[in-house]
Amino acid sequence: MGMGKVVSVAIDGPAAAGKSTVAKKVASILGFTYIDTGAMYRAVTWAVIKKGFDPKDEDQSVTLLPGMEIELLPDGRVICNHEDVTKVIREPLVSGNVSYIAAMKPIRLALVDMQRTMAQKKSVVMDGRDIGTYVLPDADVKIYQIASVETRAVRRYDENVLKGINTTLKEVEEDVRKRDYIDSHREFAPLKPAVDSVLIDTSFMTVDQAVDAVLKVISAKTGIEIPCH
């Protein structure tokens, strides 16, 4: 592959399907930039809560958009308005409210502008709910990654335990179901597979198996040779 071609990979799917874990590894193997769209919505949610606003209140929430700066650093850190929010945006308070913020059209439009600009400049792997259908409809590769609710709840719960976030498995499963409902029923850019996306069910795959499945699709669609990893 010549250096000239910018390649975009979109990985969509429901909450906690392991998209970001897979997307990060795929980006790292290919030398692409990983753009964590979920972290961007979480950063806005954090900013809204920090300001004392109600994340369900669109009129209040959108007033924070002008001048908001979100940086995604290569080492995975997330900076919002010059503050390192990497850890706080994973807390239950943000997790429980991010779907409301993500359903607000003005906020989606602002973040989508940021994301499209990033994808024009360099080869990216982007994951979210509507990357292939809406954010990057012309993405070179579109993948729709699913897993059962139970599998996803266990994965998210295990992640939380590792991060020292205190939740029960039951709470996590309820949260996953709630987010599925909000994400798939919202009016603007709801969660659904792009017609030209490749479906990968990771319910019974390890992370490495899921990464290999995604890499195979990328190679088939773009002709990129996958480096040994």
Image: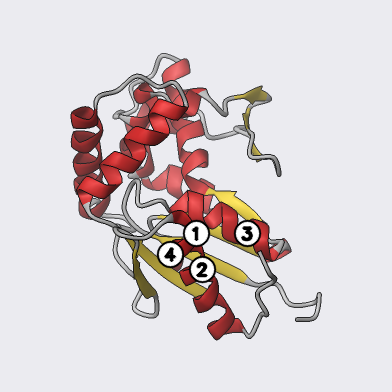
Q: Residue visible at 41% across and 35% down?
A: 159
Q: Which mark is residue 27?
A: 3
Query: Three-letter amino acid code at disc 2?
Result: Asp
3 up-or-down from 94: above or below: below
Real-space Cα distance between discs 2 and 1?
Answer: 6 Å
Q: Which mark is residue 134?
A: 4
Q: Nearer the viewer, mark 2 or mark 4?
A: 2
Asked whether disc 2 touches disc 1, contact meaning CB atoms under 8 Å apart, the reply is yes
Real-space Cα distance between discs 4 and 3?
Answer: 21 Å
Real-space Cα distance between discs 2 and 4?
Answer: 25 Å
Query: Three-letter amino acid code at disc 4?
Result: Tyr
Query: Three-letter amino acid code at disc 3?
Result: Ala
Real-space Cα distance between discs 1 and 4?
Answer: 28 Å
Query: Label 2 belongs to which residue?
Result: 212
Asked whether disc 1 touches disc 4, contact meaning CB atoms under 8 Å apart, the reply is no
Query: Three-letter amino acid code at disc 1?
Result: Asp
Query: Label 1 belongs to which residue?
Result: 208
Real-space Cα distance between discs 1 and 3?
Answer: 13 Å
Q: Which mark is residue 224?
A: none
